[in-house]
Image: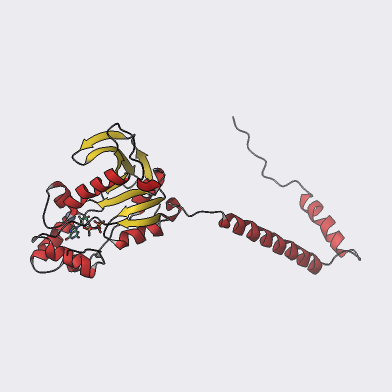
Amino acid sequence: MSETPNTQATPGTPAELSTPAAVTLAEPGTPSADTLVESVEAQVEELSAESLRIASQLAEGYRVSPLDMVPNPSPLLVESTEEVAVPTPQGLFGLRAWRFADGAEHISARALDRDGTPVPAEDGGALAVRIHSECATGDIFGSFRCDCGPQLENGLRIIGRTGGYLIYVRNHEGRGIGLVNKLRAYALQDAGLDTLDANLALGLDGDMRDYSQAALILQELGVNELRLVTNNPAKQEALESLGLQVTELIPDEIPARVENAHYLQTKRERMRHVLKSA
Ligand SMILES: Nc1nc2c(ncn2[C@@H]2O[C@H](COP(=O)(O)OP(=O)(O)OP(=O)(O)O)[C@@H](O)[C@H]2O)c(=O)[nH]1
Ligand SMILES: [Zn+2]
């Protein structure tokens, strides 16, 4: 059985507490209330200066990491698997799956030698990394409307030679607008709009991809410095704003074909992609 606490004040206590202080302040020769306040203020100032000094010292040694830069804490990493070796037409890759709190699941693929050891970084430099944005129509069906399918294959081949990772980002479909919106955007392109205006006509941005989950995966893999396999300088900017260091851009250009010539031309002229043949 619990005891009921005694909530009644002990008689006489308030007077005992207040009297000595009041008497001391009133005595001649002791510091006035104003002097006391000034001295306390001086001490507080000294303390704040000291904490500022300690804080700035800490900040000097502090390296910004992708984790610190994540704008929205909800898509945090929940779990990832061990690496499993998967033979592909482009060589052997060690695949891991990564699951985030918002339900997104991505894949990392590390280039492996035939005996299963990681391909070392070429010339002892940084590892090559391709952040490949999901494109179900191109990557699965081999659609000629875009260049994603051959870019994925070529990207894997480059990484197989150079050493490094391909991160397959599955919530980047349609430059981040999702599959349903992308197919609506295709219908608008069939009616005459280009790939950028079609997104805008749907009330969406031209590119809505968020790279924070890809950056977190790279951080978990211990990759802070990389050679980025892309034609899109916006990807470099996005990764650098998340604390990663891009030492070089490796192009992943696929020759245009009649079905995607206009699409690639738009990417070059309106979306800053570095493409020679478009
Ligand atoms: N909204 C929209 N998305 C598209 C269209 N065509 C391809 N995509 C998506 O575009 C994304 C790939 O972006 P790209 O512009 O091809 O290339 P990138 O990833 O920015 O740059 P690279 O690294 O050079 O491949 C994938 O998520 C595709 O699903 C389109 O017409 N409209
Ligand atoms: Zn595509």
The residue at the point 60 percent across, 32 percent down is: 2
Q: For this view, does 174 lie left or right of residue 106?
A: left
The residue at the point 14 percent across, 57 percent down is: 183
Image coordinates for residue 93, horizontal then vertical, percent:
27, 38
Q: Examine the rendered structure and indicate whether residue 241 appears above or below residue 214.
A: below
Examine the rendering and report whether any part of residue 254 can be seen: yes
Q: How is the image coloured?
A: secondary structure
Q: Examine the rendered structure and indicate whether residue 213 appears above or below residue 43.
A: above
- How many numbered marks have been drawn onto this rendered protein structure? 0
* Image-quadrant location for residue 107: top left
Residue farthest along the front direction in this orientation: 123
Q: Examine the rendered structure and indicate whether residue 123 appears above or below residue 117.
A: below
| Ligand 1 in which quarter | bottom left
The residue at the point 26 percent across, 51 percent down is: 132
Q: For this view, does 13 lie left or right of residue 120?
A: right
Q: Quadrant of the C terminus?
A: bottom left
Tell which of 168 and 93 is nearer to you: 93
Residue farthest along the right direction in this orientation: 28
* Image-quadrant location for residue 241: bottom left
The residue at the point 65 percent across, 39 percent down is: 5
Image coordinates for residue 211, horizontal then vertical, percent:
33, 54
Image coordinates for residue 45, horizontal then vertical, percent:
70, 64
Examine the rendering and report whether any part of residue 104 can be seen: no
Q: Examine the rendered structure and indicate whether residue 103 appears above or below residue 194.
A: above
* Image-quadrant location for residue 52: bottom right
Image coordinates for residue 222, horizontal then vertical, percent:
42, 44
Tell which of 233 and 188 is nearer to you: 233
Q: Quadrant of the N terminus?
A: top right
